[in-house]
Image (cartoon, coloured by chain):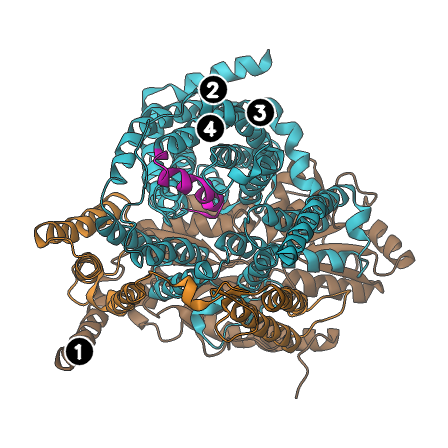
Chain colours: A orange, B brown, C cyan
């Protein structure tokens, strides 16, 4: 094998890890099914379907692992070539911060800063464009939802939004 | 950063306090969600929609119905006590299974502690139906068939542990037969099951009425104390030799810890709604008799029901195993 | 003849100016809520229900119905434009619709979905008029065993949605089933896999899962790319489907309509299964199945037609038996009842004006929708010309709104973020989200019906092959599963042989 991005039994074989995660989840589901009681075939219990689904999960995960070991799989490095992996991280961080703020600050006060952050942090949009978008989009949506469709949005402690 | 974070928390705390103070005075300022733990289209759903509609006019805010069916009508209330704030904006219909299921198995709620009971509203008329094409013409046919074929007679209920399930098991015990219960989620589903003859019988509240009127279903018995004026030819349980009456009364409640002022506002609105002619007509359509109890009486009633249910369940051998 | 007379009477009711106005308001609101992903017709309808009470029963129900099928039209817009399905049934539209948009063919994709919906909607209404009463029996012919087998068939259809590894797709499907089972058991009310989190008692919401796996994950994947700036990497050619598009789509629309109409009658996941099944069918019939997943217009036309025909079929059990097949129909049932009309076997004879008036108004509503939606296509396509660094914050904004509005709970926003991350890694490792979503929707129904049918049959597994409808479903499932497996196995073996040769 001359292809450096395709490896077999190596720690950086991404296929192998995908299968292993699947297997762990499968075992967990089987165990949860057992804990919830299988019942009898005349009157299946809460864990009946979960148990058998878990067994299937293990089966498929093992198939993936076997394929990863025998045929090899792409390395983690090759899957992330040319990717700016910090950018998705920034987006996720912004979203979590937003979710924390949503109930406390209300819809408008948390959405406008979120929009501004996303517009400026990933691929900066010039301020003269970013500010109007960050203001107008949430305001417009807020108006349509609240006034036209009478849908509730969190108002927050300042009762705006 | 740290400083402003703390400031934020302080501001948030003040805000929460302020909004809680203002809440009871202005309540309600936004739509109220009423959880109906049965699928849409059944008798409970339709009657609750009529009552909610009338109450919402009195409260001045829309009441939206949220159908959270399953677990014999307990999934909805259990979800409410688990996740809703006791701010009066989330309330639920409380069927009798909320009191009965904890006696039969492990559950996530405690009926004595987890609810703020608001008002008791009405009860059901139950009946047992079969498809019009079925071989069963009367209840006696069912008993005869079941004696010859133990366990072969299947009946659809709106869930395990519902009054329909318990009632049918009591009837079976008295008649000396064995029936097999198939738990569905509510009236709309049991209607389809018995119409398609997937189960031989249906035991449910009056959601079957339009189908009985249309001649698609045959009503074999009703569980009221006297014959229903809508079906004068159908015998009651007593007439068939089973000394029982089942009506499974229900009311509404919110999560524990609701402001008494909000409870009072809701109670007044729903009490007025019970007298609304539109509600009276809808209830009559489903043979539901208003059974009003105020907040205090409802609380007492919960204890009484729990005690009497425990006796029935123990005699049937369905009670929760004591550890 | 009698039908024609009735239809005439119906149009008489529907063409009253006040009813036309209500119909327009209904379809307008419907289009609006349909375009906003996550905000389904349910919340809009339940909030507007009291308003409709002021008028006559006809106008109230005409407006409610307008919201319903209006939202069905709008549902595919965001799937095609930004890969965010507005509802479970639109998941399948994403697969080829968004690819088409990337190739600069958003116009034809949107056009074929609007026109396909119109054709399917019209056919469904004609069928509703002619055969509604006689098809009522189809709705009740399905008992627990039949539903179980139908769900199995639905899951087998999954294998057609995937371009990658079968094992991965099946693993995703299993995970979807398990995720669907989270929450209180629908039979015993026992909490399952809730990890003591109160919010999970109610189960995981579909909207946050879909928004996360599709919307947020797509944004994450796109933001990490340096070179690819725009959503589209080709010039926008034309706005409406051309002759070749029509030729390719005619068959799929026809088959999708029939499939959707019949599956729509079934209470439960009819419309979701119908859109997936239509996609699978077209891929199976196609001479060039490899185009599916890379912007095949058939993969948009068929499922969209099926989806809308199912919306028409769903009226049958409601109007003829009083059994609502989904929550939207239940809301309509509520509207009927509040107006003093009891849907059921007697409704068509007791209230002919109402029944035929509503059906006629749906014709008019469908035409209004077409007029309303076709000009919008130009506007939507313009939206794609925005640079991605401006577009993606807007996409995030709409996913957040959709998620929050579907439950009014911030917890669901966290669920969406989590599934966004999961979806990102899934894509990186070559796992596809569509099988997970379908299994997530079907899983709880599969479980519930399996348990009920085993109780009914007293644990006898033969019940699934003894009952004819159930047996047919399972037989199709087996054919679908085994049929394509044989040649692909052979191909794989040849490939392996080649590898060793080198």
Q: CA distance from mark 4 to mark 1?
A: 53 Å
| Count of residue discs | 4
Query: Can residue B224 be seen here?
Result: no
Residue projecting furthest to the left: A128
Q: Which mark is residue C10?
A: 2
Nearer to us of marks 4 and 1 is 4
Same subunit under labels 4 and 3?
yes
First in sequence, mark 2 or 3: give its number.
2
**Mark 1 belongs to chain:** B
Residue C76 location in percent, x, y?
41, 39
The span shown in magenta is C86-106
Q: CA distance from mark 2 to mark 3?
A: 15 Å
**Mark 3 belongs to chain:** C
Nearer to us of marks 2 and 3 is 3
Q: CA distance from mark 2 to mark 4?
A: 25 Å
Q: What SS does tag 3 mark? A: helix
* Residue marked by disc 4: C116
Say few, some or many: other residues with alpha carbon within 10 Å of mark 1 (under 14 / 14 to 19 / 20 or more): few
Left or right: residue C84 compared with residue C229: right
Dot 4 and dot 1 residues touching (CB under 8 Å)? no
* Residue marked by disc 1: B5
**Mark 2 belongs to chain:** C
Classified by dominant secondary structure, the portion drawn in magenta counts as helix
Same subunit under labels 4 and 1?
no
Q: Give yes or no for residue C69 being in the magenta stretch.
A: no
* Residue marked by disc 3: C127
Say few, some or many: other residues with alpha carbon within 10 Å of mark 2 (under 14 / 14 to 19 / 20 or more): many
| Quarter-of-image position of residue C209 | bottom left
Quadrant in which the N terminus of chain C is drawn: top right
Nearer to us of marks 1 and 3 is 1
Left or right: residue A73 compared with residue C361: right
Residue A112 location in percent, x, y?
17, 58
């Amino acid at each position: 094998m001359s292809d450096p991005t395709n490896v077999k039994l190596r720690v950086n074989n991404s296929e192998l890890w995908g299968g292993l995660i699947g297997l762990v989840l499968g075992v967990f589901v089987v165990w949860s099914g057992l804990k919830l009681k299988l019942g009898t075939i005349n009157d299946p219990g809460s864990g009946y379907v979960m148990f058998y689904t878990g067994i299937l999960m293990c089966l498929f995960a093992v198939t993936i692992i076997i394929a990863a070991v025998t045929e090899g799989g792409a390395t983690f490095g090759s899957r992330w070539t040319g990717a700016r992996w910090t950018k998705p991280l920034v987006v996720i961080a912004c979203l979590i911060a937003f979710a924390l703020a949503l109930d406390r600050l209300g819809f408008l006060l948390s959405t406008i800063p979120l929009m501004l952050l996303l517009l400026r942090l990933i691929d900066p949009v010039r301020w003269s464009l970013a500010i109007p978008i960050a203001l107008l989009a949430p305001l417009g949506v807020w108006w349509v939802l609240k006034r036209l469709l009478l849908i509730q949005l969190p108002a927050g402690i300042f009762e705006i939004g | 950063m740290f400083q402003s974070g703390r400031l934020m928390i302080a501001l948030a705390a003040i805000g929460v306090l302020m909004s809680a103070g203002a809440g009871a005075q202005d309540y309600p300022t936004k739509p109220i969600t009423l959880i109906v733990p049965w699928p849409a289209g059944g008798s409970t759903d339709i009657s609750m929609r009529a009552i909610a509609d009338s109450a919402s006019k009195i409260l001045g805010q829309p009441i939206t119905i949220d159908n959270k069916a399953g677990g014999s009508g307990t999934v909805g209330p259990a979800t409410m006590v688990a996740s809703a704030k006791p701010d009066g904006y989330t309330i639920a219909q409380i069927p009798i299974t909320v009191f009965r299921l904890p006696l039969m198995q492990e559950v996530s709620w405690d009926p004595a502690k987890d609810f703020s009971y608001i008002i008791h509203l009405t009860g059901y008329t139950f009946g047992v139906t079969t498809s019009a094409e079925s071989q069963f013409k009367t209840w006696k046919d069912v008993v005869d068939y079941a004696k010859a074929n133990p366990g072969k007679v299947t009946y659809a209920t709106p869930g395990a542990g519902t009054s329909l399930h318990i009632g049918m098991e009591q009837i079976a015990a008295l008649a000396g037969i064995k029936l097999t219960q198939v738990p569905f989620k509510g009236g709309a589903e049991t209607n389809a099951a018995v119409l398609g003859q997937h189960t031989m019988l249906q035991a449910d509240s009056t959601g079957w009425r339009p189908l009985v009127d249309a001649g698609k279903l045959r009503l074999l018995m009703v569980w009221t104390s006297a014959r229903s004026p809508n079906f004068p030819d159908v015998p009651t349980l007593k007439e068939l030799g089973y000394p029982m009456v089942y009506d499974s009364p229900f009311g509404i409640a919110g999560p524990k810890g609701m402001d008494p002022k909000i409870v009072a506002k809701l109670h007044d609105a729903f009490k007025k709604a019970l007298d609304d002619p539109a509600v009276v007509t809808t209830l009559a359509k489903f043979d539901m008799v208003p059974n009003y109890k105020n907040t205090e009486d409802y609380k007492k009633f919960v204890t009484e029901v729990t005690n009497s249910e425990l006796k029935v369940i123990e005699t049937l051998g369905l009670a929760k195993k004591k550890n | 003849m009698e039908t024609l007379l009735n239809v005439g009477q119906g149009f008489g009711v529907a063409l009253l100016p006040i009813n036309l106005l209500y119909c327009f308001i209904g379809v307008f609101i419907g289009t609006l809520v349909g375009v906003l992903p996550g905000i389904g017709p349910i919340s809009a309808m339940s909030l507007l229900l009291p308003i409709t009470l002021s008028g006559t029963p006809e106008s109230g129900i005409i407006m409610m119905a307008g919201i319903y099928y209006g939202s069905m039209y709008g549902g595919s817009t965001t799937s095609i434009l930004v890969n965010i399905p507005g509802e479970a049934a639109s998941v399948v539209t994403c697969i080829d619709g968004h690819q088409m948009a990337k190739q600069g063919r958003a116009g034809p994709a949107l056009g074929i979905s609007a026109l396909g919906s119109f054709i399917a909607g019209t056919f469904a209404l004609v069928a509703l008029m002619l055969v509604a009463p006689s098809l009522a029996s189809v709705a009740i012919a399905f008992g627990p065993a039949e539903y179980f087998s139908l769900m199995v068939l639905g899951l087998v259809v999954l294998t057609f949605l995937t371009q990658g590894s079968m094992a991965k797709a099946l693993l995703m499907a299993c995970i979807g089933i398990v995720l669907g089972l989270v929450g209180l058991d629908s039979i015993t009310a026992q909490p399952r896999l809730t990890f003591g989190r109160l919010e999970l008692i109610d189960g995981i919401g579909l909207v946050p899962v879909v928004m996360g796996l599709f919307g947020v994950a797509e944004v994450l994947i796109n933001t990490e790319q340096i070179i690819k700036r725009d959503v589209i990497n080709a010039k926008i050619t034309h706005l409406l489907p051309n002759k070749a598009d029509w030729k390719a789509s005619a068959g799929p629309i026809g088959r999708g309509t029939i499939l959707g109409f019949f599956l729509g009658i079934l209470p439960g996941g009819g419309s979701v299964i119908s859109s997936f099944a239509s996609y699978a069918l077209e891929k199976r019939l196609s001479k060039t199945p490899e185009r599916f997943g890379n912007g095949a217009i058939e993969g948009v036309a068929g499922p969209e037609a099926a989806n809308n025909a199912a919306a028409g079929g769903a009226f049958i059990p409601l109007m003829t038996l009083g059994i609502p097949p989904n929550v939207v129909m239940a809301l309509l049932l509520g509207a009927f009842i509040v107006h003093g009309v009891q849907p059921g076997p007697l409704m068509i004879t007791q209230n002919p004006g109402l029944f035929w008036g509503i059906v006629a108004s749906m014709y008019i509503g469908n035409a209004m929708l077409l007029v309303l939606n076709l000009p919008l296509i130009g506007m939507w396509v313009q939206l794609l010309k925005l640079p991605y660094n401006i577009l993606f914050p807007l996409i995030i904004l709409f996913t957040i709104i959709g998620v929050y509005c579907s439950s009014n709970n911030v917890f669901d926003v966290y669920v969406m973020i989590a599934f966004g991350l999961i979806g990102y890694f899934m894509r990186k490792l070559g796992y596809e989200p569509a099988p997970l979503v379908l299994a997530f929707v079907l899983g709880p129904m599969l479980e519930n019906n399996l348990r009920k049918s085993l109780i009914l049959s007293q644990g006898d597994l033969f019940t699934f092959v003894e009952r004819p409808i159930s047996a047919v479903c399972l037989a199709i499932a087996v054919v679908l599963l085994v049929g394509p497996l044989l040649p692909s196995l052979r191909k794989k073996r040849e490939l392996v042989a080649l590898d060793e040769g080198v």
